[in-house]
Amino acid sequence: MGTNSIYDVVNKVHYDNIPPTGKDGGVIIFDNKRRNPNSSMYKKYALNRKHKQELIKTIQSKFSLSPSSIKAATIEFKLNPVTIQKYLNMSLRQIDDLDHPIYYKKRKTIMDDYINIIYKMLRDGFPNLAVQTYVFSNGYRGSKESLKDYIHDVKKNNFPESVLDERISSKEHKSKDTIISMSRKKILNYITDINMKTISNDFMIMQSKYPILMKLRYVYIDFYRALMSDNTKDMDIFLSKYENTIMHGFCKHIKKDIAPVHNAISQEISSGFVEGNNNKLKLIKHTLYGRSGIVNLYKKSYLAFQATLKDFDLSSLLANNQT
């Protein structure tokens, strides 16, 4: 199924994040953990569990639950008596369960709001790409790769028979099924890139689907050229061109202060020096004042501005302060 058909499908279905239930009405506990059995750490933990099984079986074969026997096992294996007693009380099933890792409760992540949605869609036979598209359409703002890997892990852990079908399908439809995800910052970077140095294929695809992106780019370029021009008429042309479009609010606010805007375009004098110093003072206040008080605020501000002078000498300034 192609990209358009996937969007059509996910727009017609509805899934919530309520835990899934079986035919008997009971809640289904599914495996949503991420693990790699082939990793060195996983193999190390598996080997440790095997050693622990052998140790427990050895203790149970040699000792009993009597106080004297527990004391003797404590001395021989250098373990806590409570641990020895726990091992002696373990059943064969509990010992065999050590073949599998303990599934501790996961800390809260961005995926928690979509865990049950992902499982239920996979259970109902939706392909990974459709699940990914539906999760994005329901407000997911995390990494595309993380979501893709998570969906694959849930399928692998709970529906292993469909993983092979997924691999075959991904090879057949790799060029057809695509989903584009791009942050707001990246989109703005492309829109405001005057030189058009590098435009990714993902942005080109999004641009073809959302023509408003190209329109915004044209607006930005026109405004940039008008603002950086030496001729104030360029700004008037920009305002007359866009005042009756979706940018009418933006143009309206510029018209209110058109005289300062014209001055900024036509004159070399600006308030940049004043605004820069204001920013420096606010930064010093933010990082220092609340903790050190007004006296140190003055000293820090004085030092920050004195340091820009050509004849500034820090050693003499410190000597004067000490005296």
Image (cartoon, grey):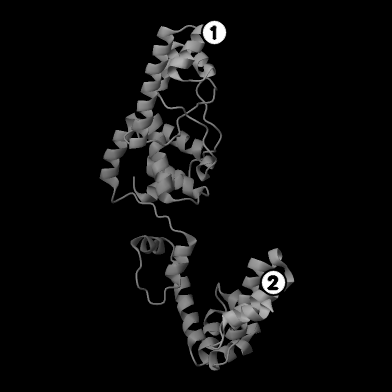
Quick check: 120 left or right of 159? right
Please say if 6 is above or below 199: above
Give amino acid for label 2.
Answer: Asn
Provide the residue designation for mark 2.
296
Which residue sits at x=54%, y=32%?
19
Q: Classify residue 217 by image quadrant.
A: bottom left
Tell me where residue 314 appears, x and y as whole percent.
58, 80
Quick check: 203 left or right of 74? left
The numbered mark at residue 67 is 1
Tell me where residue 175 appears, x and y as whole percent.
28, 51
Q: Say whether residue 35 is visible.
A: yes
Which residue sits at x=59%, y=76%?
250
Tell me where residue 300 appears, x and y as whole percent.
64, 74
Which residue sits at x=43%, y=32%?
123
The numbered mark at residue 115 is none
Give amino acid for label 1.
Answer: Pro
Question: Which of marks 2 and 1 precedes in the sequence?
Answer: 1
Q: Say whether residue 89 is visible.
A: no
Seen from the viewer's position, the closer of residues 94 and 308 is: 308
In the picture, the quarter occupied by the N terminus is top left
Seen from the viewer's position, the closer of residues 277 and 216 is: 277
In the picture, the quarter occupied by the C terminus is bottom right
Quick check: 210 left or right of 298? left
Which residue sits at x=31%, y=35%?
38
Is mark 1 in CB contact (under 8 Å) with mark 2?
Answer: no
Farthest right residue in view: 294
Q: Classify residue 154 by image quadrant.
A: top left
